[in-house]
Image: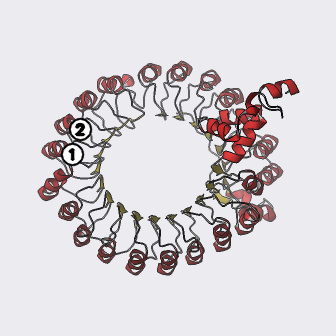
Amino acid sequence: MSEEEAQRYGGGTGGGGVGALSVDLLGQVLDRVLERRDRKACRLVSRAFARAEAAHRRALRVLRREPLPRLLRAFPALERLDLSACASLDDASLAAALAGADLGTVRQVCLARASGVGWRGLEALVAACPRLEAVDLSHCVGAGDREAAALAAASGLRELNLEKCLGVTDMGLAKVAVGCPRLENLSFKWCREISDIGVDLLVKKCRELRSLDISYLKVSNESLRSISTLEKLEELAMVACSCIDDEGLELLSRGSNSLQSVDVSRCDHVTSQGLASLIDGHSFLQKLYAADSLHEIGQDFLSKLVTLKATLAVLRLDGFEVSSSLLSAIGEGCTNLVEIGLSKCNGVTDEGISSLVACCSYLRTIDLTCCNLVTNNSLDSIADNCKLLECLRLESCSSINEKGLERIASCCPNLKEIDLTDCGVNDEGLSSSISDKGLGFISSKCGKLIELDLYRCSSITDDGLAALANGCKKIKLLNLCYCNKITDSGLSHLGALEELTNLELRCLVRITGIGISSVVTGCKSLVELDLKRCYSVDDSGLWALARYALNLRQLTISYCQVTGLGLCHLLSSLRCLQDVKMVHLSWVSIEGFEMALRAACGRLKKLKILSGLKTVLSPDLLQLLQACGCRIRWVNKPLVYKDAI
């Protein structure tokens, strides 16, 4: 850019153009630029915008640990920091990055699955972030009481996620409870070493709790007795708490009338009588999840459910035994429902659905998975009454056909997700045997579609993809696996889907690197790509990925005809790549694997590779990968080439 152009766009030091605006004003402008690529363009065209973003940026997600120290110093106004994607982040690197950085504004930190961070790193984090309010340590399976104790030093914590921190016991929970009395949201789901003792102490110390998740714990009714004393609790999840029964729900009902959401899914010893008592004590419930808990619904529960007419918005009864009269009663009594879950419910018929939706015109999500008695009549009723519908799940509803689906698409303009897996409908009904005709129907009726699964739709051709790309510009997730008639010409149309993030092309034997290049040059937001058994994809496809797919994080190239040179170039170029599956790359030598994996060290979090390489790859490489936080899945699969059908 010339000096004249820089000054015109505010990139110079003069007082004209964008450079004349204040940092605060430019920051407000950037806040209204939602697309990441557009924000980047602003930074590149103007140094004033770059300075404004540095001073105004509130959130940061870091993919590699190397630039972390520089980034923390470049953005002094950060409030939210996501380190969950740093594959090799450990205590030493985290402490070094935090040292000297001004993090006084940071309030939220995500370390989910950051298995390399232990108590020393957490101590450094708490010390560096004096205003810390929220920490996510979920799925750090090695975290235990020492890590919990380190977090307890953050006395201002209001939100803490310890899901699947398997080493946390009552002692660690006690440390958190004593150190963080202002906690409002807490999850220790799957922390199975926590007992009633820990829950009781938590309740006594943390009286501000509003959301609590104790799912999959071995706690008993005594925990519910303690929890019932929390006067501000609004959300309680206790999925699969097998030691909790109706007596516990009765104890819970005697507490404060503050609960708005309760999840007792998979609680085997809970009955409709217990749920009735729960509702009786909490008249402001908005969400009730009772999936796979009851075999039938008693009249006592139904009569209490009707009392929630003004507030209940979400009701999940998956796996229940229902009847038309029951659904009619629910519809008449719960007219403000926005979501109903009837997955795998026996007894769901057209009559029941019609009577339900006739009263529930605000429904946005309807789940009828495996309700195989429903027909087009149900879809007609939904189309007539639920104009706000966004999500309709019809998996294994084998009695519906194209007429009912056409009514849904025509009458529900907000539809974003529709699941037709194993519906058994014909071509025009968008079945698994869908052809270009059915795909053309989707394109013309479902312009807001964001997810489409065409797995094994072997009749789809390049013409169908042309229609799809023309009519469904908002698609983010697309599955074309085993659509074996698709060629490079068809993939060229997909480049128009600028919002596409996930693309599955498994076993498309007619596509080559030319088609891959067509996709990635247009789909700059692509995050996940599956090319398994795309036998004609070679190094030219990898070179295209290396040049254009800069945001790619997950890649499957098993059975592709690539060489070590292409693989090395790919893994050294894609700085965001974290998960690679590369089984049976027959043209890649041992040296090729060595060079490629060394080039990706420090970034990879997951690697799937043949077990036979375990003994021939150098031990220091394997140790380096593991030290950098990479989990290697060794597989022993014979080299079998499969047809695309």
> Which amino acid type is shown beneath numbered disc 1?
Cys
Front in this rendered view, residue 491 or 257: 257
- Would residue 110 be found to the left or right of residue 92 on screen? left
Q: Which residue is drawn at 67% across and 56% down?
A: 605
Figure quadrant of residue 225: bottom left
- Would residue 644 be found to the left or right of residue 518 on screen? left
> Which amino acid type is shown beneath numbered disc 2?
Cys
How does the figure colour the protein chain or chains?
A: secondary structure
Q: Residues within 10 Å of mark 1 (few under 14, many from 20)?
A: many
- Would residue 425 be found to the left or right of residue 320 on screen? right
The residue that disc 2 covers is 360
Picture coordinates of residue 555, whole percent (x, y): 65, 44
The residue that disc 1 covers is 334
Front in this rendered view, residue 636 or 473: 473
SS at mark 2?
A: loop
Identify whether 519 is placed above or below 575: above
Identify whether 232 is placed above or below 415: below
Q: Which residue is drawn at 46% across and 65% down?
A: 187
Check whether the beta carbons of the residues at disc 1 and disc 2 lie within 8 A of each other.
Answer: yes
Picture coordinates of residue 386, whole percent (x, y): 28, 32
